[in-house]
Amino acid sequence: MKKIVLLIAFLSTNILLMATEIKSPNGALVLNVMVKDRVPIYWLNYKSRPVIKQSRLGLQLKNDTALTEGFVISNNTITRFDETWQPVWGEVKSIRNNYNELAVTLTQAATQRSIIVRFRLFNDGLGFRYEFPLQEKLNYFIIKEETTQFALAGDHKAFWLPGDFDTEEYSTVTSKLSEVRGRIKAAVTPNSSQTTFSETGVQTPLMLKSDDGLYINIHEAALLNYACLSLNLDDKNFILESFLTPDAIGDKGYLQTPCLSPWRTIVVSDKATDILESKLILNLNEPTKFTDVSWIKPVKYVGVWWEMITGRSTWAYNNLSTVQIDKLDYSKTPPNGKHGANTAHVKEYIDFAAQHGFDAVLVEGWNIGWEDWFGKWKDNVFDFVTPYPDFDVKEIHRYAASKGIKMIMHHETSGAVPNYERRIDTAYRFMVNNGYNAVKSGYVGDILPRGEHHYGQWMVNHFNYAITKAAKYKIMVNAHEAVHPTGLSRTYPNLISNEAARGTEYEAFGGNNPDHTTILPFTRLMGGPMDYTPGIFETRISKINLTNTSFVHSTLARQLGLYVTMYSPLQMAGDLPENYNRFLDAFQFIKDVAIDWDDTKVLEAEPGDYITIARKAKGTNNWFIGNTSDENGHQSTIKLRFLDTRKKYKAIIYADAKDVHYETSPQAYTIKKMVVTNKTELSLKAAPGGGFAVSIIEVSAKKNSKIVIKQQFKYINVK
Ligand code: NOJ
Ligand code: CA
């Protein structure tokens, strides 16, 4: 009898201690969750291999008992979900959102508080978040730190950026996790005012590869009213732990129940291509609440921009160094002779855009204040409505409209966010009245007034405020220096792109590593599209501005490939019209390439080495292929099996010429035309720092019999 009682007691304790297990819809991923010693933990396996070992969950609160221990599981709810939805714009026409969900209610008896951890297990990975229901004992609270762990199974290869609360504009470091500590100081841009938050702190999305070939990506989804996630590494045990961006006084978030954390995401596969095809982060965001989305349209644009970045012209109108906006009368100050945004010059860009079928023209430096844009008066330097005397807003509006070109507004806030918020309605109304339906915003410099970080809860709320406010005016937003994207474009599709990484502009500030664009899709782009501004044909910056010795770390052919590999519904042709006019045959690809897609096939990929992607243009049977390769180049064999078996296509192949190298001879390319079918196999070689681009255009059935592709021709342009 005694034995039986003991056995029952033993069994019931074990039942309480047992983990709850759920599987992904295809069974490849297995998640376990339990409370062990009253601490909530989870672990994740992929095809029986550990992805995340037993890891703790929880949060520390300021002036309150931590939500990290003392828990029992008071409820487990398991559900399934399967739907297919259509994005307003995207890499594919429709997206399947299919997961098994486990919602675990954790109750802390001593404080009478409960939280829910909701796990969603997809075929491509795991998402989970904290939910804080409205309750008497948990009402307002301040987060001291979130303590979510990701315990890794080994010393993985990592593609990382140093932890920083204000910029992602770094070159990615590729190293073992155990090497982060030794390399982090050198990774921070020399002379930068930025500091890392610890000796082992890294940003997300963090891309990892295990020795046995598992690809793991850790990031977050639906970052709303919460501080941005970074990760602190315990490099003895390879445990990553969440580290939230603090506010100006060190707090990490002010919340009021009912409320939610963003989703913590782990995308995993044994194929690198699956990581790039994952839609997990979008799926974890809410469907759009916009009822009318007809005004949201992908945009291909040129702009008065690269000439300022390279130093040939200026944003500022004159040579003054400080300007107090209310005091200065610009009509009485002489121009410096290098002001880019003048009416006549902008009209040249409008002509060029119209001639080559672009949608829009961006103009930076059109409004007064740039003389002191991050100086003494920056808290009030821009009003976003007053043009320089040589920029005629009405005439530009009339001229652009007459040519069917949209203008893209530029709002550089220089981080003076209260100034921007105070003026935002007037600024957006001014845009509507003058025919602008898209804005590129910028947040260069320290955030005013009290030194918030770019990625703290306060700025996360500002970025989102600007997007939702813009939607009221039917304005699309492309925010630069913004917090890392987390798939919010599903909910707010007018968030048409972001910078939030080291873009092409750095090619004029010393250069990007040749493998940079083979990494970004695995890191930054996991959260959403990037305004990378590719298409630089004149790779020697000194050809534009004698005093600038930088060069683009890419071949010309690769600049074309980037229009396919760097997904964005907002794509710029970044170079000067005069450079495109020198290479009009190569420019043809930028004119032809689509910016919105029905389908995407990631043909081959290895982070840090190469990426080749094929995409099917929206509403057509045309395909575009792009490749970007690192300093070693890459040999690709591409089977066009994705083409329709019944159709014939004309392919134009833009590739690096023989002996091309990104450092010594980046501009030589070949263009080859041929007829292809779904049986065709293409053998294409990317040079060191090179790439290629292919357009595959359906030949309509009628013309089919008549297609004559003139003798394959080869054009080599050598400097
Ligand atoms: C930095 C942005 O990334 C760049 O595109 C812009 O031209 C400058 N800020 C000025 O706003
Ligand atoms: Ca490499």
Image: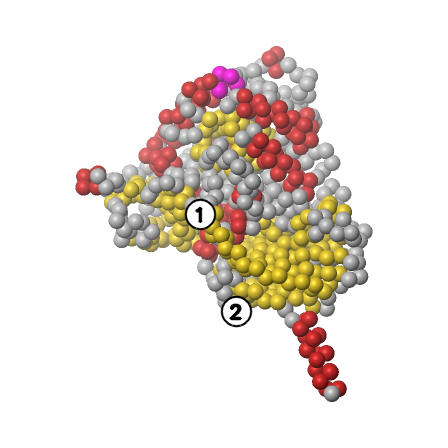
Left or right: residue 678 compared with residue 304: left
Q: Which residue is mark 1?
A: 94
Query: Is residue 394 rendered magenta in the image?
Result: yes
Q: Which residues are magenta?
A: 393-397
Q: Which residue is mark 2?
A: 48
In the image, residue 337 sits, relative to residue 13, either above or below, namely above
Residue 28: x %, y % from top left: 49, 65
Say which amino acid is labelled 2: Ser
Mark earlier in primary sequence (1, 2):
2
**Label 1 to label 2: alpha-carbon separation:** 31 Å
Front-most of residues 305 and 457: 457
On-image quarter of the C terminus: top left
Residue plotted at (43% across, 37% down): 535
Front-most of residues 663 and 14: 14
Q: Main secondary structure of the magenta part?
A: helix
Front-most of residues 602 and 122: 122
Residue plotted at (60% across, 30% down): 412
Whether residue 261 is visible here, answered yes or no, is: yes
In terms of secondary structure, where does tag 2 sit? loop
On-image quarter of the N terminus: bottom right
Crowding at dot 1, Cα within 10 Å, few <14 / some 14-19 / many 20+, comes out as some
Residue 183: x %, y % from top left: 61, 53
Left or right: residue 404 compared with residue 498: left
